[in-house]
Amino acid sequence: MNRRSFFASAAALGAAAALPVRSASASSPRRWDRTTDVLIVGAGLAGLTAGVTALRAGAKVMLIDKRAWFGGDGVLSAGQFYSARTPLHDAAGITQHVEVEDYWKQIESGVDDEPLSKVRDNLRLSVIYSGVNKHNPEVLHRSAEYSPRVVAFVQSYGIKFRRMNPAKPFQCPTENGSMSKFAEGMVSEIERRGGKILPLTRASEIVMDGGRAVGVIARPVSGGSPVAIRARSIVIATGGFLNNKAMMKRYKRFWSGIQTGFTAVGDGVPTDHTGDGIVMGRRAGAAIEDMESMPKLYAGPRKGTPGVSWIMFDVDTAFLVTKAGRRITNEHESRYSGCALKLLSTHNEVGYAVFDEKTFRGPNRDRWQFDKALAGHGLFKADTPEELAAKVGVDPKGLRETIDRINRDGKTGRDTEFGRTDPLFRAMTPPYYITAANWPLAYKTEGGLEVNPDFQALRASDDAPIPGLYAAGSTCGSISTRLCDVVASGLIVGRIASAAR
Ligand SMILES: Cc1cc2nc3c(=O)[nH]c(=O)nc-3n(C[C@H](O)[C@H](O)[C@H](O)COP(=O)(O)OP(=O)(O)OC[C@H]3O[C@@H](n4cnc5c(N)ncnc54)[C@H](O)[C@@H]3O)c2cc1C
């Protein structure tokens, strides 16, 4: 039984479906207020990319967004892309094992934390494996193939990438603040090319006619009459459902209770991720997938305390300790998300990153904003483990033992506790640094509308593409909700949707 037929039978048993599936969500209105070739619902990075691409292909394009601003979560993001070989790799001398198929192997092997949920969940060792072949890997593979094009597209807006780090040969981090510039660049291009982009306009229904999506009903957020927009192609790019309590409870169970945020507890992420596109799509008869997978985790300090991003475990020598001063995982392999998960699974309420002067003064000092954190009590410095522990209420004996062990192991390059073998594993030299307490948080969901490799939404009843209906970005359950996949989906769907008749 494949994943799609699983959903169909589970829905029949009332086990998995949260929303009723109807073949049509609204009958065709008698009068259309606006008409366009391609209508994009949601002007996050997926929607904006789709808009630019469709315009470049010669289509008449309209975008609507319920917010007053464009760019969605992308403009708040850390701006880290992933890609197979690009000129950035060549510039950093990373030329071995970085072609598309190497990148894909990494995704499939599940050694990095993000895309693995899409492929790894098919594996028996997965925490959510249920004997169901969950994903069509072709969609994610297509996105992986597009990754170098995504980087080139981003660069075409004048965005600068940081020098790559061989420790993570597929990570392509942009400079701080780049994603607002990227979104602004796309909005300007859309306007320059004659696209319409309407803020504060919320879509509520997809209009179906004879099994085809033919338009959308939207309303100004401030109230007022509904607007019926007719389009040949409709791209749903409305993001995830982290703030839809009913959907979170229904699909994510345990995870629905987790705190949300990014830069700090309850901070950094807008609270209107209500899964509108997934709800609308379901009403129009679309299939969903991956709804039950774990939301993406992060960890952040209390609101108002400047944080030090745990993304640093990717590229800097740093260690995660608990209140007992103990390590709990291989930080480099687990990455920020796996570290947050480990805290939860070991029933540790909080964790702390520990590092030394060499890391503090290293090439990423500005990227992680160490100085700001130090000045704002998000980071503390001391000459001994005991003094360091006292600053944040960590057990001094535990921290002393942990640091002594790291320093012993670091000399031989063999992590006797968690088996780290990466080049970032080394002894530390004082003074030492420790962050303020960080709590595990969820900041985005995976799961949503099921699409084929052309990002056409699939019908729940027979897996056929729904004519006229597409999904892009984190509204799709078929890709991971990373910037690289979100932008790739926009590049692909913009071209396909503009060519559709
Ligand atoms: C703080 C933070 C940091 C991140 N850092 C990274 C990173 O470094 N690397 C990485 O790969 N990923 C990162 N991510 C994830 C990544 O930014 C997102 O997954 C991605 O930006 C999602 O883009 P999207 O266009 O699919 O959705 P969104 O950005 O959520 O955009 C959806 C848009 O649709 C609009 N919308 C919703 N409902 C409606 C409706 N009914 N009608 C009209 N409009 C609607 C919303 O207002 C929004 O503008 C981060 C996310 C966060 C929150």
Image (cartoon, rainbow, N blue to C red):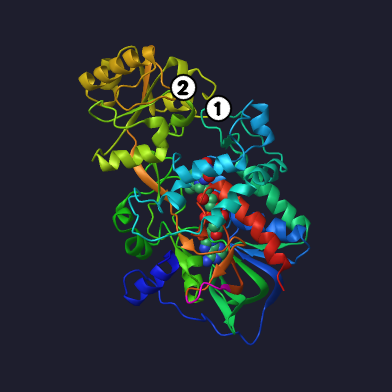
Q: Is residue 19 above or below residue 425?
A: below
Residue 416 in view, yes or no: yes
Write down the region rendered in magenta: 461-465
Q: Position of residue 348 (x, y in %)?
A: 25, 38
Observer-nearest of 82 and 304 = 82
Location of the C terminus by quadrant is bottom right
The part of the image, by quadrant, that contains residue 131 is bottom left
Does residue 144 sit above or below 498 in this rendering? Answer: above
* Residue ID at (29%, 28%): 327
Secondary structure under the numbered disc 2 in the rendered image:
loop
Vertical side of 200 occupied by 79: above or below = above
Kind of residue sitting beneath label 1: Pro
Q: Main secondary structure of the magenta part?
A: loop
Residue placed most toward the observer, 1 or 371: 1
Q: Are marks 1 and 2 in contact (CB under 8 Å)?
A: yes
User: Relative to 496, is 432 on the left or the right?
Assistant: left
Q: Which residue is mark 2?
A: 423
Q: Which mark is residue 14?
A: none
How far across and down, in percent of the image, does residue 62 sit? Answer: 68, 66
Marks 1 and 2 sit apart, C-alpha to C-alpha, by 10 Å
Q: Which residue is painted at 61% across and 85% down in the image?
A: 29
The residue under label 1 is: 166
Q: In the figure, is residue 261 to the left or right of 27?
A: left
Of callouts 1 and 2, the N-terminal one: 1
* Residue 382 among those drawn in magenta: no
| Residue 302 in sight here | no
Q: Residue at x 37, y 43 (%)?
A: 265
Give coordinates of residue 229: x percent, y percent.
Answer: 64, 75
Instruction: For the N terminus, give its image quadrant.
Output: bottom left
